[in-house]
Amino acid sequence: FLLSFCLANASQISNGIAVVIENEPITINELRKAAAQLKTDETTALNLLIRDRLETAQIKNLKIEASDYEVNQRLEKIANDSGMNVAGLRSAVTSKGGDYAQFKDDVAKSIKQEKLYQSIFSEAKINISENAARAYFEQNPSAFARFSDISVTRYVAPSADFLEVARKSSPMNTNHSVHMDVLDLKSEQIPPQLREIFQQTADGTFTQIFQTPEGFEMFYVAAKKGQVVPSFEEVKNEAMNAVYRLEQERVIGEYFNKLLAKANVKHLR
């Protein structure tokens, strides 16, 4: 009823509030904007917004906070991971038209959300057995298939800024400060974590920038070739993690469905 009500009235309300859930409003404009940004339909967007409001209400109910120290520590980590200090992070946010105060608020919100989810998972006591992971692997072998060979270009530079420039230009067009290696690798030659990053990176695109003892590096994935399905022993940890994530999704789904069932929901025209 909630979804049909909102969608039926969306065309009649432009700036008004469609739903108030646990004293947290959802406006029609917000619904339409979320659907456009997520490139999804309004039903899915509304479900996500309802989930967001339930999170916000539950964070308030449980009095979950993010201290200034926690926020500052997270900002430092974000900055360091991007190869800059906090002042540089502030400049990067504002130079792109962002509001740094809002950025900090978003960081604080993410910390609170993490604490909420940690609490939920702690109470659920999720345990995954090797047998469950093996069964999942055997039922979903294609989920663990990976390339057999890959061609990449590795870029190393003293500053992340040089790599950002390389990312925006031709893959082979770099300045003298950037060291470049063209590599043809077998899947088994690549460390598991990096191999997974390559697997998730589309051909013809760059990976994220990483900080290393040598400075900063990134990879251009030219082409992945072939396909192999590893043995369960090779991907046991990946299978365990996959099943664990599924259990997390189940626990979270049940948790918020229960909250929604007893939530105070108001429909406004």
Image (tube, rainbow, N blue to C red):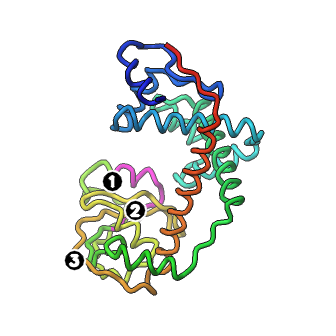
Please provide percent x and percent y for residue 231: 38, 86
Asked if disc 1 and disc 3 are in contact, CB closer than 8 Å, the reply is no
**Disc assigned to residue 166:** 1
Viewer-nearest of discs 1 and 3 = 3
Instruction: Name which quarter of the figure residue 251 lies in.
Output: bottom right
Front of the two marks 2 and 1: 2
Q: Is residue 102 above or below residue 157?
A: above
Q: Find residue 83 and report its horizontal and vertical position in percent.
A: 53, 53
- Residue 164 magenta-drawn? yes
Q: CA distance from mark 1 to mark 3?
A: 28 Å
Q: Amino acid at mark 2?
A: Met
Q: Is residue 165 above or below residue 131?
A: above
Q: Looking at the image, is mark 1 or mark 3 earlier in the sequence?
A: 1
Task: Please state the horizontal and vertical placement of residue 188, each as a whole percent of the image.
Answer: 36, 84
**Distance CA(mark 2)–CA(mark 3):** 23 Å
Residue 226 numbered mark, or none: 3
Image spot of residue 92 (x, y percent): 50, 38
Instruction: Give the amino acid at mark 1.
Output: Ala
Q: Which residues are magenta?
A: 154-165
